[in-house]
Image (cartoon, grey):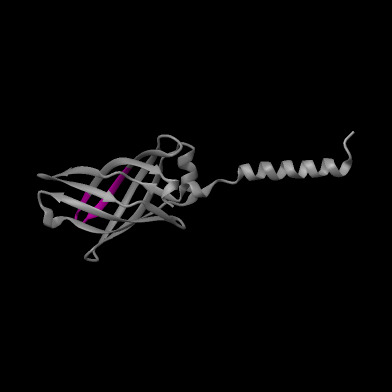
Amino acid sequence: MMPRPLLCLLLLLGTVALRADAVPDHGKWDAVSVPPVKTSIYVGSVTLTTGIFQRDGDAFNTTYEAKVWPWFFWSETGRITIRLPYADLEKLARGERVQFTGEAMNHKGKPRHVTGHADRGDDASGKIKVRIGVDDTEIIFNGTYRFDNAAR
C-alpha cells in the first residue's frame, strides 16, 4: 500500500496537470498573416496587402496598402484594426464561423468601416471574407489567414 503523503502528492500533481491542459494557449493566436487579396471593381481591380496582424487585447492591428488599378491615384495606405476576442478565437478553433468588426484609417485620416467573417480550415489556417466600406461603396475581399507564432 502507498503511504498517504505520497498518494496525496500524486493526486495533487495529477490535478494540476489536468488543469494545465484545460487552460487554452492564447499565445498561438498572437499573430496572423493574410496573403494579398484581390477583388474586381467597376472597370478595374483592388489589391489589398496587409502586414502581419499582431494581437493587442481583443484586437489585431497592422498596416495595409490598397492598390487600385488602373486608377492608381485612388490607392491608399493606412492602419487596420479587427476586433476578435479570445472567446471568438476559441469558437473558430472548434470549427464555428466567427463574425468580426473593425476599422481602418487611411493615410489621409479618412475612416473605413470593416466587417467580415472567418472559417476554420485546420488548426492554424482558414478562409476569411472582409468587407471594407469606402465612402458609399463596400469592397469585398475573399482570402485566407494563417496564425503565425514565428512572427511574434
- What is the chief secondary structure element of the magenta stretch? strand
Q: Nearer the viewer, residue 25 or 93?
A: 25
- Quadrant occupied by the N terminus: top right
Please state the horizontal and vertical placement of residue 79, each as a whole percent of the image: 30, 59
Q: Nearer the viewer, residue 16 or 98?
A: 16
Which residue is farthest front? Answer: 150
Please state the horizontal and vertical placement of residue 132, each as a whole percent of the image: 26, 51
> In the figure, 3 relative to 134: above or below?
above
Residue 59: which quarter of the image?
bottom left
Please state the horizontal and vertical placement of residue 3, each as a whole percent of the image: 89, 40
Task: Assess whether residue 96 is covered by the magenta stretch.
Answer: no
What count of labels does the image hold?
0
Specify the segment rendered in magenta: 129-138
> In the figure, 8 relative to 51: above or below?
above
Tell me if 148 is positioned left or right of 74 in this view. right
Which residue is farthest bottom? Answer: 109
Residue 121: which quarter of the image?
top left
Give the residue at x 21% y 65%: 108
Please state the horizontal and vertical placement of residue 55, each as a whole percent of the image: 43, 54
Tell me if 2 is positioned left or right of 152 in this view. right
Residue 109: which quarter of the image?
bottom left
Tell me if 61 is positioned left or right of 57 in this view. left
Give the residue at x 27% y 54%: 64
Give the residue at x 18% y 51%: 67
Q: Which of 24 and 91 is in front in this view?
A: 24
Q: Which of 149 and 68 is in front in this view?
A: 149
